[in-house]
Amino acid sequence: MELQHTRSTHDSHYALFFQHWNALSSIANRLHLGRNDFVFHANSPGKNVYALLEGRIKLFRVSHSGRELIQWFCFPGEVFGFAEIPHNGERGIYAQCCSDAVVLSIPERDFRHFIDTHPTFAIMVIEQLTLRLRTVGDMLLNLTSDDAGMRIKKLLVRLCARFGHWQGDIIVLDVSLTHQELADMSGTCRQTVTSVLNTLKRKGILQIERQRILILQPALFDESVEATPYKAFHDKMKSMG
């Protein structure tokens, strides 16, 4: 239910974005960036909004100790970098390419006019921002209420909900993530992520192939994650099969 809704929303955003592709590209500069290149840095002026065409972008903050905390990833069809528009302030986070990427850079004034004249696109942007706020809220709640192992499992639930798909009786998470990236998203360390994933693999709950996570036994995975909506999602998907 809730998780299925999230997945459907991501797919509809992708389709809607490319319906507006020609109009959007006419007001934007196209940037071709390499892996590890930055789209923008924290404390830089927030004068442009960005739309991702190809690749993957991670949005993160850096703690006083120098550690990254990934807040979310952007995939093709998503808009980012618009949080500073209402107050014309500086960036609060970093945006860095996880792979080669093609990004549209749109001046703030042109972006404002575009959403004024394209209401369906404006609604998509609001929905994307709402999903990100919910994700950050879940992360903060999990940091204060769960141990490291449970945070990693709940992170996998959120990722499967948004980016996973059924392949027979298993769920395939088609997002290539390193153990370090999973650690940075869950507020843990790489060694803890490796330990949790190895435990789930020994139990036959998941396996990893070419950096793709396969949930082999969704029902058992559900039992290992307390107080999540995953079971409702699983039951709903089974009834549709």
Image: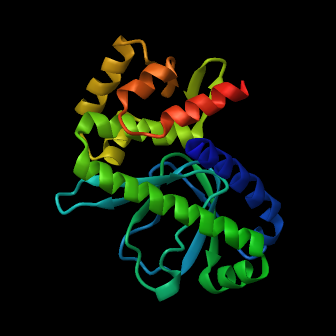
Residue at 37% across / 34% down in the picture? 153
Residue 235: percent from the left, percent from the top? 59, 29
Q: How many numbered circles are shown?
A: 0
Give the camera-side residue of 233 and 25.
233
Give the camera-side residue of 3 and 14.
3
Vertical comparison of 5 with 47: above or below: above
Residue at 43% across / 36% down in the picture? 156
Residue 220: percent from the left, percent from the top? 43, 20
Residue at 55% across / 49% down in the picture? 56
- In the rendered structure, the answer to whether residue 163 lies left or right of residue 65 reads right
Residue 2: percent from the left, percent from the top? 57, 46
Residue at 32% across / 45% down in the picture? 186
Please state, as top left, top right, bottom left or bottom right, where the C terminus lies in the image. top right
- In the rendered structure, the answer to whether residue 143 lies left or right of residue 135 reads left
Give the camera-side residue of 105 and 221.
221
Give the farthest residue toward the left.
Answer: 65
Vertical comparison of 131 with 157: above or below: below
Residue 231: percent from the left, percent from the top? 50, 32
The answer to whether residue 59 is visible is no
- In the rendered structure, the answer to whether residue 74 lies left or right of residue 178 reads right
Please state, as top left, top right, bottom left or bottom right, where the N terminus lies in the image. top right
- In the rendered structure, the answer to whether residue 21 lies left or right of residue 232 reads right
The answer to whether residue 139 is visible is yes
Q: Quadrant of residue 233?
A: top right
Q: How is the image coloured?
A: rainbow
